[in-house]
Amino acid sequence: MNFKEKLSDADLQRIKAAVKSAEEKISGEIVPVIVERSGNYTIANYKGSLIGGSLAFIVMIIFDRYIIKDAVTTLFYDPVFIFLVVILGGVLGAVIPNFSDSIKRLLVARKYQDLVTRQSAENAFLEEEVFNTRQRTGIMIFVSFFEHEVIIMADKGISQVVAQAQWDQIVQDIINNIRRGKIVEAMEDGIQQCGKLLLEKGFKKTDDDTNELHDNLRF
């Protein structure tokens, strides 16, 4: 089951309603985006393979030095057998990260995860055309679950007047709610906070304002 299937229609409607409510008084457009992961991180499989193969070889050495005493056990000393054991360890090491997000995270540097998530958020910003508003007042709330990251990106009409520390506080509140398992509440609260912040900064809805971007949650 992918992440989209984990949210019910009622959940999606709640998030959509939160966007609609937040935009009723502001000239900005709020775009919520959720992804399961921002990258495939095949580097974790390569690292896992190297670690698995190395561990298999170390185990062979330990068996040779401390466990196997009978020199008659010729199979263990066969180079082909040793090669096959190391290959098997490498294959297992490469496959295991595909079944465990925790192990995959351990094998991928935090700095690299941050970079990939930022690039994914920037791509989503362009793909969802968050920039395509009349007054350049689009905001995207981007949540990437594998990396445990939340990024808020605002178009230049908003980013020029809102301090980064204010976005950081909203991000932290979203993360805290998600950690408590309250995904929908996290999105609702983040959307509402963005709406309030824009209202405080003077981005009030005008008579000729239209809904330029749809209110649905994007996956």
Image (cartoon, rainbow, N blue to C red):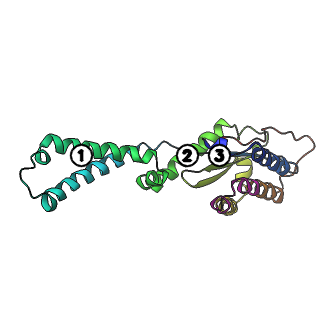
Crowd band around label 3 with a 10 angstrom C-alpha radius: few (<14), some (14–19), many (20+): many
The residue pinned by badge 2 equals 37
Where residue 65 is drawn, which disc sits there?
none
Q: Is residue 41 left or right of residue 167?
A: left
Is 212 or 88 nearer to us in this picture? Answer: 88
The residue under label 3 is 34
Q: CA distance from mark 2 to mark 3?
A: 9 Å
Category of crowding for the residue at label 2, using alpha-carbon neighbours closer than 10 angstroms: few (below 14), some (14–19), many (at least 20): some
Q: Is residue 76 left or right of residue 130?
A: left
Judge whether residue 35 is colored magenta. no
Residue type pointed to by label 1 = Val
Secondary structure beneath dot 3 equals strand
Give the residues drawn in magenta, as a range.
176-189
Does the magenta-highlighted stretch encompass residue 188?
A: yes
> What label does residue 86 carry, if any?
1
Please, is residue 127 above or below residue 167 in the view?
above
Give the structural element (helix, strand or loop) at label 2.
Answer: loop
Nearer mark to the viewer, of 2 and 1: 1
9 is higher (above) or lower (below) than 107: above
Mark 2 and mark 1 lie on one chain; the one further toward the N terminus is 2
From the image, state whether disc 1 or disc 3 is nearer to you. Answer: 1
Disc 2 versus disc 1: distance between alpha carbons? 31 Å
- Pinpoint residue 185: horizontal percent, then vertical percent: 74, 56
